[in-house]
Amino acid sequence: MKRTRKPSSDPKQTRFVGLIWRLLQPPATRLRAGDVIRIGKKICRVIRVNDCAAVVIMNRPPRVFTTRFDKPVSFAQPPAMFRIGSNSEVEILNRKSHRLTERRSA
């Protein structure tokens, strides 16, 4: 007696997995590491993100002053590091919209 092998996956299962995959993807408004954002008029970079906060680094302008002997001196300040909420509503400059890429490929 010959046994026939049944397919191991159900063709309807791909739709179900696709729905779960969409639920697991982070929302578009959540910050990710490497994002470039704008806070006020300054551009900042997101260094790391966890559930409750995102660590952001912002460059500071160089300090320029004159010494007692009237020589101009300037030096670069270290970047400012601060934390904001990981779901903050800030303008993300370097992330492309997912909907635009779907329309272009279709």
Image (cartoon, helix red, strand yellow):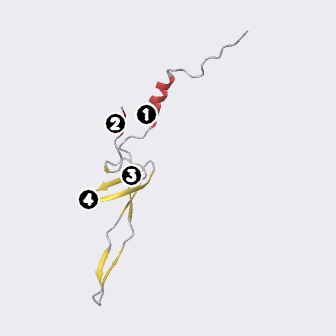
| Residue 3 image point, x, y percent | 69, 13
* Residue furthest out toward the bottom: 69
For the residue pair 47 and 54, the one nearer the viewer reads as 47
| Residue 15 image point, x, y percent | 46, 25
Write down the residue under mark 2: 104
Q: Are marks 4 and 3 in contact (CB under 8 Å)?
A: no
C-alpha span from label 2 to label 3: 23 Å
Q: Residue at x 39, y 69 (%)?
A: 78
Residue 82's place in the image compared with 71, above or below, is above
The secondary structure type at the circle numbered 4 is loop
Which of the two labelled residues, at mark 3 and mark 1, occupies the earlier sequence position?
1
Q: Nearer the viewer, mark 2 or mark 3?
A: 2
Which of the two labelled residues, at mark 1 and mark 2, occupies the earlier sequence position?
1
The secondary structure type at the circle numbered 1 is helix
Indicate the amino acid at tag 4.
Lys
| Residue 65 image point, x, y percent | 29, 80
Q: Residue at x 45, y 50 (%)?
A: 50
Write down the residue under mark 4: 41
C-alpha span from label 3 to label 1: 21 Å
Which of the two labelled residues, at mark 2 and mark 3, occupies the earlier sequence position?
3
Q: Residue at x 33, y 34 (%)?
A: 103
Write down the residue under mark 3: 35
Indicate the quadrant where residue 36 lies. bottom left
Indicate the amino acid at tag 3.
Asp
